[in-house]
Image (cartoon, rainbow, N blue to C red):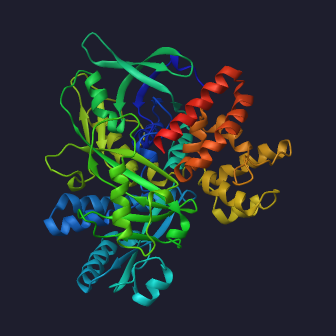
Amino acid sequence: MLNSRDENYDIVVIGGGAVGSGICLDATLRGYKVLLLEKNDFGSGASSKSSKLVHGGVRYLEKAIKEFDKSQYNLVKEALKERAIFLKNSSNISKKLKINIPCYSYFSLIKNYIGLFIYKLISSKNSLGNNTFLNKVISSYYFSNLRKKSLKACISFYDGTFLDFRMIISLLQSAFENGAIVKNYCEVRNFLYDENHNISGVKYFDKVKNKEFEIKSKVVINATGANVDNMRFLDNEIEKVLTLSSGIHIVVSKDFLSSNEAILIPNTSDNRVVFVLPFLEHCLIGTTDNKTFYEENSKVKEEEIDYLLKEVNNYFEKTLTKEDILSSWSGIRPLVKSDKLKTEQINREHSIFSSKSGLVSICGGKWTTYRKMANDMMDYLIKQNKIEKKELCKTKKYKLVGNKQKKNILEKLLSFYPISKETKKSLILLYGDNSTKILALADENKDYDLLDERFPYLKKEIEYCIKNEFIQKPIDYLARRIGLCFIDKKSSLELVDIVCEEMAKILKWDIEKKEIEKNEAKEFIQNYF
């Protein structure tokens, strides 16, 4: 890797979440020299704490129709186009998902049918499948746990689902392969200015090396999500551009859903929607939407869990309790500031701001439109003459790293190795066609040992992730490379020791360093999952 201390860059991107990673890739593919800096691990903020949906936004469409709101309609239309691009370019870590809406009155049945019909019409050639109608008997058969009293039918439609934490790594690997420098655990603490007080670079602190560096750059982009205002304050901008919203998710056993399809609860007590989704052989339930304040690591609040349990239990025969929760997490959404009272009323459109000194900030949006946000940012920089025009945007048709080989071909390739069906499935799901690199590592020493007999993860995945996926700490691997923290808090805590042992061997940690990492990982998992 190049020594960034001696480098001048065209663009420095601050923030290694969905938007920052997307911008890094777009800029790199256009021929610019790019450095991305993330103060913690990549995707450790809201970008790994989404509902795992690639969607146009059914509820935004409902608001567009009810309120004759063209901006909401345009957001849905744009998102449906982006959904198609997203699924095509990340085919191994994303797929279409059938979502079912249970209807308990004929009015809601007709309303939902019309709404989903319009949703499909808007998607046009990008439609993922036909809407279907399931009567009460069939709905009760497919979803045995769904409340049957007063149930009229289920209306189903298609959206996409993906692994957000894997998408981040795929984007960054793609950017890195094309020449970008990406660094985690590097916190920007100050900006550098020229004689006219225009930003000319950044000063950042490398938390792992415990050193400070200065970098020169033509453009500095603030893509720090919920931290956007704080970075602007660092640049002496006093106006806030964000409204922050907290969203939590809980994970329970897959038996609660008993299906590979999802349920959308359409009418909560506060007129929101809640999703019940299949996720890594478990069931994911979310999300809340409440105004909040900035926290680097937000904690799930008891009242938020109570809210989700109450709303879900209204729709299912088997009631959930807090004891059923295997893991939970909270993320902070960075919404564009609005005068609307409730955050669920604020649409997910994005905005770009330039400060007096030239710091360019981007906020708003959602995972589905990350690519469009990156495209808009690059077009903005060129239009504003902040950077010279080079090549055109290439991300519409760019297959991301790990997604270039089809799944059926991968399955055949992996069948030659002495691994279980569960391990094969896990490798393809998490790493796509990079799973062959992991197995090549394992084959060198004929080492196919599992991390733990209860799980499908190979020990060699850790070595691969250190060499190819930028992991520096045990929590990086457990949370944002294999996703175990998101589905099983207890097991994640139990595996910290063995992950630390493996990392210590490869990274040459001494006993003191190993103990520090163990304690830090356990404390983080205990507090934030």
Q: Residue at x 45, y 57 (%)?
A: 322
Q: Is residue 32 left or right of residue 224?
A: right
Residue 177, can we see it?
A: no
What percent of the width, then of the height, locates residue 71?
20, 57
Is residue 166 positioned above or below 196 on the image? below
Residue 405, can we see it?
A: yes
What percent of the width, then of the height, locates residue 446?
86, 46
The one nearer the camera, 489 or 442, is 489
The one nearer the camera, 241 or 351, is 241
The one nearer the camera, 213 or 258, is 258
Q: Residue at x 53, y 71 (%)?
A: 260
Is residue 464 positioned above or below 10 on the image? below
Q: Residue at x 20, y 33 (%)?
A: 240
> Which of the 4 image quarters holds residue 220?
top left
> Which of the 4 image quarters holds residue 506?
top right
Residue at the far right in the pictured view: 446
Q: Residue at x 33, y 40 (%)?
A: 377
The one nearer the camera, 163 or 128, is 163
Q: Is residue 89 left or right of residue 295?
A: right
